Amino acid sequence: MSRGYEKQLAEKMFDLMEYFAGYGFNKSHSAAYALVSYQTAYLKANYPVEYMAALLTSVRDNTDKVVLYIEECRRMNIQVLPPDINLSRENFTVDDKSIRFGLAAIKNIGWNAVHEFIQARQVDGIFTSFTDFCTRVDTKIANRRVLENLIKSGALDRYGHRAQLLAALDMGIEFAHRAHRDREQGQVNLFDLMPENSRESIAIVLPHVPKLSVKQQLDLEKESMGLYISGHPLSELSWLCEAIDVRRVSELQELTDGLQIFMVVIISSVKRITSRRGDPMAFMSGEDLTGSCEFVVFPEVLKRFGFVLDRKEPLLVIGKLNNSGDEPRCWWRSLGRWKG
């Protein structure tokens, strides 16, 4: 108006701009997202293994997303292989037509240890045995916790089954310390001087112990990596999920709030508290093949089914969905029972 324009015209111009802002911003975004969607769809269709490996690497610090994308790999018939001390790099990588788990995804390993292993492979070749691996690693970086988690994750499976390697862990650490002391004192390691066909005489002898059960092996993978790789405890219950219309964690945000649902989950954690009335209740974290969510176990339900909360077994939960918060929750109402 100070520049000579009518107030009515100024208001009309502002109303037009305000109206455009209601859809113009979304339009510009939809064009950009459409282009990205086309590019990613092209990559997934034409380079599925490479695409999924990159996608998994991009969410490596988000266990729920990693679990979801590994399940997508299974749906696409892409095998996700466990970590391997001679084949894995830091992140998820393409291994022929499969995806190889990265060493950095193993808990308590750390980037320094991962780089130590990779550099050792590049300088002196692959690790030929459990003994060779133990004598070549730096014990300041690869300590007991690191070696133990490598075994539990399956990264050293090529040298023996996991029960054997865990039983020989103390001997392996002793070999590693001895080799490290020799190097620090400028001594040549006797193992390195011996011909390869004579090294077995001083190699670590793996004890004859029974193999771990499938459940025990899966539990070790869960402990060391935060997820299951070689299988899943719920895989054998796919028939049940189909028969009673079981909902998956990945579906929950799309469902109607307040809906009664069936879920088959493994309990990963339980937090017991006291309600305002002084009654015991609990918050439970449960997971399936696609992720995890929280369950609220009210006093009356806890009283009836509290005895199962500490079991690492599949549970059929009947609950009421609450989608009002940031993450879906399920009010646990009952527990299904079935034979088998």
Image (spheres, rainbow, N blue to C red):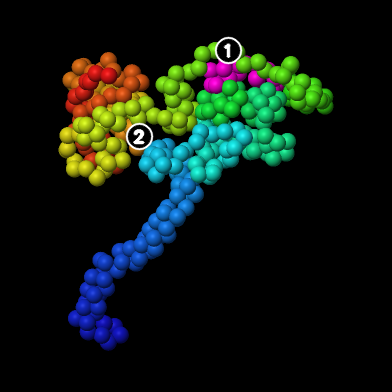
Residue tagged 1: 208
Q: Which amino acid does label 1 sit on?
A: His
Characterize the magenta stretch by its predominant secondary structure. helix
Nearer the viewer's eye, disc 2 or disc 1?
Answer: 1
| Vertical comparison of 294 with 32: above or below | above
Residue drawn at (69%, 40%) of the image: 122
User: Is residue 112 in view?
Assistant: no
Is 189 left or right of 52, judged from the image as shown? right
Q: Position of residue 173 (x, y in %)?
A: 65, 20
| Vertical comparison of 151 with 325: above or below | above
Question: SS of the residue at dot 2?
Answer: loop
Say which of 240 and 192 sits in front. Answer: 240
Magenta includes 79? no
Residue drawn at (50%, 41%) of the image: 99
Residue tagged 2: 289
The C terminus: image quadrant: top left
The N terminus: image quadrant: bottom left
- How far, Cα to Cα, is label 2 from label 1? 34 Å
Numbered tag placed on residue 200 in the rendering: none
Is 250 left or right of 108, judged from the image as shown? left
Q: Give the range drawn in magenta.
A: 161-177
| Vertical comparison of 319 with 66: above or below | above
Q: Position of residue 80 (x, y in %)?
A: 47, 38
Q: How many labels does the image show?
A: 2
Q: What residue type is labelled 2?
A: Leu
Q: Where is residue 276 in the image (x, y as percent from the top left)?
A: 21, 24
Quadrant location of residue 247? Answer: top left
Quadrant location of residue 130? Answer: top right
Question: SS of the residue at dot 1?
Answer: loop
